[in-house]
Each structure stands twice: as structure tokens, then as C-alpha cells.
Image: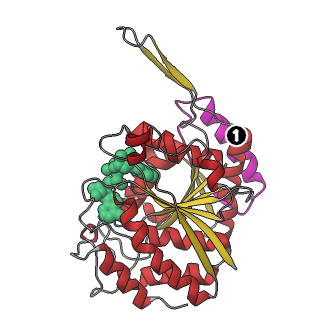
Amino acid sequence: MAYEIATIPGDGIGPEVVDAALPLFEDAADAAGFSFETDRFDWGSERYVEEGAMMPDDGLDRLESYDSILLGAVGHPEVPDHVTLHGLLLPIRKGFDQGICKRPSVLFDGIESPLRGYEGGDIDFVVYRENTEGEYADVGGREHLGFDNDVAVQSGVFTRDATERIVRAAFDAAAEREGKVTSITKSNAQAHSMVFWDDIVEEIGEEYPDIEVERLLVDAASMDFIRRPEEFDVVVASNLFGDILTDIGAIVTGSMGLAPSANVNPDGEYPSMFEPVHGSAPDIVGKGVANPLATVLSGSMLFEHLGEQAAADALWDAVTDQVADPDAPRTPDLGGEAATEDVVADLRDRLSV
Ligand code: NAI
Ligand code: MG
């Protein structure tokens, strides 16, 4: 079976981590007895600067036939962030109906958490983030531009379909894990959308009597991600809240450079997209020290999604094996001095399927 994977390395450290990780993915596929081909799409901020658009008008059509998409990161200091996000990432997530964003936060053995007293295995949760609407809906506008009374209006959009879909996915995941769902809202302040969300959690929760349901307001949740991260199992949140909380999840488990994510189209009608949680990291770009592990773990999630569990496990296990080894190369974000390439070379030696 030969899969076809589209790669969009993007900006900044995106190409560094994607290019470094691909040979490792080929090793894992070879060993597991399948193969894949990649086509590289050089879309992103450079294209925007030269041609006025992050991707071509028919970008989604060109991606649609692929089995999966692997993305690095987008974002450039000279291009406004809303342009890079709305010009590439959000159109793919929305246009391919990738309603379920899965972001695991695992504190691996050998990784030091900035939280005192936590050791490998103590933190292990996954955030299910609604990924197509909510606070990221493109509904609103600006008026009276150029006058002193200019105004901005931005509305959140919460549909029953998308909300039920993410909540149900979270309950299904909890049934396979520790049996607990934590739903994040701000229903005290946002009494329409977030109370709607609460109602749906309640309805769907009735279908899963064995799952424990916890509800937290997002401000309290931000505190609890730091105060008691060990108590979370599956966390379900809207687009914005999920985005914010997963940065906290990434850092309490060691580094942005370790956090993977999957943007899943649940019906399989369109390709799903896999990407590290981090951005283009302009502060370290070109130095060759970007941590490739978030991309490697995202590759593991990609293979798992394709049903290639052996290759998925091989990548995940190579990472856990490496970070547990005090003599293994580490990039500076994990306290080491190694280069991106050294980390990948070491992973290739550790890979076993
Ligand atoms: P960032 O994730 O790029 O960087 C935050 C911090 O984490 C920086 O100190 C960076 O050096 C470090 N870091 C991130 N990834 C790392 C890795 N693989 N290895 C080692 N260190 C790593 O977030 P920031 O600085 O807020 O945003 C930079 C640009 O990226 C902006 O233009 C932003 O819009 C964009 N961005 C894009 C995202 C995406 O493509 N999904 C997500 C987040 C931000
Ligand atoms: Mg983010």
C-alpha cells in the first residue's frame, strides 16, 4: 500500500522540522511494510510576500486527493499573524471539515516539568478542541475605519452538529482511557454559546453513564492545568479555549517542542492534517536547533490515523526511549546542546518495528 502525503513545511522552523523528520518516517514505514510518497507544497509567508496569497486559490482542490497532510508551522515576523492563519491554516481546517483537534500532553520519563514534584508518567491527558468554528468563526467586521469611533464586531458560532461531534469524540476517547471528561467553558459570562455547550455535554453525558464528567470555567482550568494536571484525562474545549490550554499543556509537560497535534476530519471525506502545536519560532529559526520531536509525534498520529499502528508505535516509542536516555542528544529547549539533525539521527538508530 502506498499512501500519498502532502507536506506543507510552511515558515520559520516548519521546514527545518518537517525535512528532518521525513527520513525517519520513511524508515518507520519501510520497517512496517508499507510506503508513502510525499508532494511538497511550498506555501506560506514567502509566497504571500511574493504573490499576495499564502496558497493558491485552488489550494484545497490540490490537497483533497491526498491521504493525509503534514504541516510544519506558519507565521512570519513581517506578515501579520491573522493573514498567515486565515490564509492557510484555518481554510484547511475548515475547508476539510477537520472538526476534531486532538492534542495529547504527556510528561515523558526523562523530561523535566517546570512544575515541582512531577515525574515521567504523572501527566497524561489529551485535549479535544473544536476546530472549525466557535470563537474562530469568520463572522464580524470593522466599521468606521479611519474615524475615531471605529468599531469591531466579532461573533462566536456554535452549531449543534460541530459541538455534538467534538463532545462525543471526547466521551469516546475517555471510554478508551481513564473514563473522565473535563468540559471547559465560560458559561458564567457567555450565557448563550457556553450554556448551549453545557447543555450538549449534559445530553451526551447521559449516553455514557460510566464516564465521570467535570466542568470547569476556563480561568479556573488554566490554574488547574498547572496546579493539578495529573487529574485530567480527556479535556474538551472550544476552538479558542482549546488553543490556549494546549500551550499550557505543552509547557507543563516540558516544551513546546514536544507537543503534537492531529486535525481530524471524522468522516474521512477529506484528508486530516497533522502538525506540531508550536509555531514558526522566529527566535531560533536558521540555527538548526529546533526540536523535531513534536513533528515526529505528529507523524506517529498521522500513521495511527492511516491505520498503520506498528509504524505509529515505532515513532512514539523511539521518542519515549530517546528522552528517557540521559546520554541521548537533546535540543536546547530540553536543556541540551544538540542540533535537530543529531536528534533525528539518534531516533533512526532507536527505531524498531
Ligand atoms: P512559537 O510556538 O513559534 O514559539 C514559542 C516559543 O517556543 C519560542 O521561544 C520558540 O523558540 C519555542 N519553540 C517553539 N517550537 C519549538 C521547537 N520545535 N523547538 C524548540 N523551541 C521551540 O510561538 P510564537 O512565538 O507565539 O509565534 C511565532 C509565530 O508562529 C507567530 O507568527 C505565530 O502566529 C505563529 N504560530 C503558528 C502556529 C501554527 O502554525 N500552528 C501556532 C502558533 C504560532
Ligand atoms: Mg496555539
Which residue reaches farthest left?
337
* Stretch of the chain drawn in magenta: 183-212
Q: Nearer the viewer, residue 343 or 116?
A: 343
Three-letter amino acid code of the residue under disc 1: Asp
Task: In the rendered view, tell whether residue 233 sits above or below residue 31.
Answer: above
Task: In the rendered view, tell whether residue 256 sits above or below residue 340.
Answer: above
Q: Is residue 143 left or right of residue 227?
A: right
Which quadrant does the C terminus fall into?
bottom right
- Residue 32 position in % (x across, y down): 61, 87
- Residue 65 position in % (x across, y down): 69, 59
Whether residue 87 is visible, yes or no, is yes
Whether residue 252 is visible, yes or no, is no
- Mark 1 = which residue? 199
Task: In the rendered view, tell whether residue 222 sits above or below residue 141.
Answer: below
Report whether the residue tagged 1 is closer than 8 Å to ligand 2.
Answer: no
Q: Nearer the viewer, residue 147 or 63?
A: 63
Report which quarter residue 9 is drawn in.
bottom left
The residue at the point 62 percent across, 33 percent down is 157
The residue at the point 44 percent across, 61 percent down is 229
The residue at the point 51 percent across, 91 percent down is 352
Which quadrant does the N terminus fall into?
bottom right
Task: In the rendered view, tell whether residue 338 sits above or below residue 128.
Answer: below
